[in-house]
Image (spheres, rainbow, N blue to C red):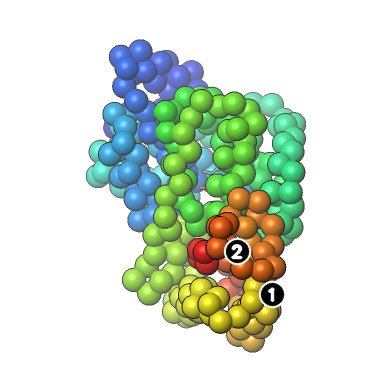
Amino acid sequence: MVTFSTIKEISAYLGQQKATGRSIGFVPTMGALHKGHMALMQRAKNENDLLVVSIFVNPEQFNNADDLKKYPRTLREDSQKLEEIACDVLFAPDTNEMYPEKVTEQYDFGQLDKVMEGVFRPGHFNGVAIVVKKLLDIVRPDRAYFGEKDFQQLAIIKKLVAMEKIPVEIVPCPIVREPDGLAMSSRNRLLNSEDRKIAPFIYKTLKEAKLRRNHICANPLRQMIINIFEGNDHFRLEYFDIVNDETLQPVNAWNNKTGTIACVAVWLGNIRLIDNIRII
Ligand code: PAF
């Protein structure tokens, strides 16, 4: 694996690789790599000649300074994991390299970033879009891989790529779960052992929503699941919603012709967790 920390060096290297006709699969990450990331990377390896991974904790997407400070940074451990899966290129820039000047871009994603995460994390998706656009411009991959756990992020990245006409295929990859159902996330390692045991309740409740969908209409089901989360003292619910999988707007009646996703964000202790499940 070759590691670069400057845009100039990685651009030159990947330019040479592309000139020989090699395809590039790209997995952008913020590090603290887990099996979910590794599944994206394995898929990118299988489908491309070269696997490029970036590790950059992007300050622009944190609307909470404490969250940014707490975010796990484990570059040495991550590099080891990347070596083990035979990653070809790691790009690990610092903040000055990525943002030598004050960032000013403002994207308009219409209604996509006005719901769910967008309500509770103002500016978050603009920050994600800024860094993803920049990384895609640097790496110029054939395919870029994103996990469906961040379902809203994925929808916004698809829109960004369409709006900016970026020549890349966005490949969505299924959520990878722990054996007890907890969706893999870099934040899981911040849970204390007590909360870690409680956390699978999130997926258990999402599965309950999916099961009930054949028996209850969308609005009462939404309220029922909200009540279940609010009735559990361990959690502080930010949102639970049942939304169209393209527009991300709330679904009020079942329609088997459109995709429907149930999404949740909760605080468990001082750790914020998100998850989702396909309902239709
Ligand atoms: O999903 C993430 O880890 C980040 O939001 C991403 C896409 C790497 C951008 O910083």
96 shown above or below 233: above
Q: Position of residue 89 (x, y in %)?
A: 35, 31
Residue drawn at (64%, 82%) of the image: 224
Foreground tag (1 vs 2): 2
In the drawing, does residue 78 fall left or right of residue 133?
A: left
Image quadrant assignment for residue 60: top right
Quadrant the N terminus occupies: top left
Residue drawn at (25%, 44%) of the image: 84
Return the disc, 1 or 2, that comes first in the chain's sequence: 1
Q: Which amino acid does label 1 sit on?
A: Asn
Mark 1 lies on a secondary structure that is helix
User: Label 2: few (<14), some or many (≥20) within 10 Å?
Assistant: few
Q: Position of residue 16 (x, y in %)?
A: 36, 14
Residue 191 versus residue 37: which sits nearer the camera?
37
Image quadrant assignment for residue 15: top left
Residue holding disc 2: 255
Q: Where is residue 199 in the image (x, y as percent from the top left)?
A: 49, 75
Instruction: Give the spatial CA distance, label 1 vs label 2.
Output: 13 Å
Residue holding disc 1: 219
Q: Determine if the C-beta at disc 1 is less than 8 A from ligand 1.
A: no
Q: What residue type is labelled 2?
A: Asn
User: Label 1: few (<14), some or many (≥20) within 10 Å?
Assistant: some
Residue 12 versus residue 175: which sits nearer the camera?
175
How many tags in the picture?
2
In the drawing, does residue 6 fall left or right of residue 111?
A: left
Q: Can residue 28 be seen by looking at this rendering?
A: yes
Circle on res. 1: none
123 shown above or below 241: above
Residue drawn at (31%, 32%) of the image: 48
